[in-house]
Image (cartoon, rainbow, N blue to C red):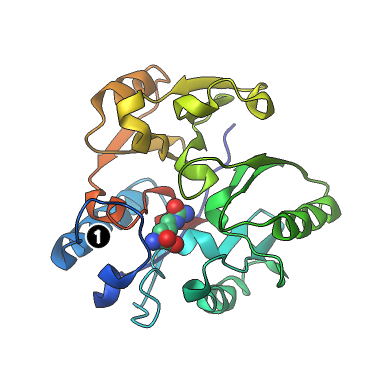
Amino acid sequence: MPRSFENAITRVPAQTFDRGLTTSKLGPPDYASVLKQHHAYTDALASIGLNVIELEPLPHYPDAHFVEDTAVVTPEMAIITNPGAASRQGEEKTIAAELEPYRQIESIQAPGTLDGGDVLMIDNHFLIGLSERTNQQGANQFGCILDKYNKTHTAVAVGAGLHFKSSVNYVGKNTLIVTPDFAEHQALKAYDKIVANPDECYAANTLWVNDHLLVPKGFPNTKAKLEALGLPIIELDVSEMQKMDGGLTCLSIRF
Ligand code: CIR
């Protein structure tokens, strides 16, 4: 039986949204469209049974609505991260305060850095991407915390894309959706794979939640492959988030 989540923390994007970090060359985001897309996203989460805890915008942190990077929550505890980008450090404190009533709190300490976007939780096993945001010390600290709770992990180097979950996500039924460069990766050999089309790599950032698939709009070939899983699909336009290197997984913390 797939794990079911009760809650999702989200944050309304601030008007300063366009001052966030980005490597994309997709042009400036439009704030009204950002809000509309964010609203459709929270509506989708609510429609599949999640209680959405929506936080106020944080204008001094233009990336703060990408809440996933600040915490990883398991059934037993929450690991508060130390985000790898200097401009995002401090976001995690506001999230720790939200999670304290629900979970035992653990945390990553400097000089370790880790972004939640680099952590893929598959039941009690965790894949941890080593990226420009998550360093070896951060991954080691994360691994030590997992050990305490009898959970296992594997570290994986991230070659392309911002985070590990820009390229690899779990979609239920022992299956990962991956970009072509992860199709034959040794660390992922225990899983079946759906490989995103080479011109649709962004669709690898698909979110499996409460046995539904939230899929970014505009990637029809990869969506057709996901349909073979037989799960209900909710297609969402996140084109404005993509302009800021974000996507479906990073807009919420599910627990
Ligand atoms: C950043 O560069 O930190 C943000 N502009 C995007 C973060 C996206 N987070 C994620 O995919 N987990």
60 lies left or right of 16: right
Q: Give above or below for 2 relative to 245.
A: above
Q: Name the image quarter holding the N terminus.
A: top right
Location of residue 100 in the rendering, given as x and y in whole percent from the top left corner: 63, 74
Location of residue 23 in the rendering, given as x and y in whole percent from the top left corner: 36, 55
Would residue 14 be visible to someone looking at this image? Answer: no
From the viewer's side, name the closer residue of 207 and 18: 18
244 lies left or right of 33: right
Q: Amino acid at mark 1?
A: His
Q: Name the image quarter holding the C terminus.
A: bottom right
Location of residue 169 in the rendering, given as x and y in whole percent from the top left corner: 50, 37
How many marks the image carries: the answer is 1
Residue 153: name its quadrant.
top right
From the viewer's side, name the closer residue of 21 and 10: 21
Residue lying at 77% horizontally and 60% vertically, measured from the top left: 141
Q: Give above or below for 64 relative to 76.
A: below
Q: Residue furthest top?
A: 228
From the viewer's side, name the closer residue of 40 and 241: 241
Q: Secondary structure at mark 1?
A: helix
Residue 77: name its quadrant.
bottom right
Say if disc 1 is inside 8 Å of ligand 1: no
Residue lying at 36% horizontally and 25% vertically, measured from the top left: 198
* Disc 1 crowd, CA 10 A, few/some/many (<14, 14-19, 20+): few
| Residue under numbered circle 1 | 39
Residue lying at 52% horizontally and 49% vertically, measured from the top left: 5
Residue lying at 30% horizontally and 28% vertically, measured from the top left: 199
Would residue 163 be visible to someone looking at this image? Answer: yes
Question: Ligand 1 is found in which quarter of the picture?
Answer: bottom left
Residue 116: name its quadrant.
bottom right
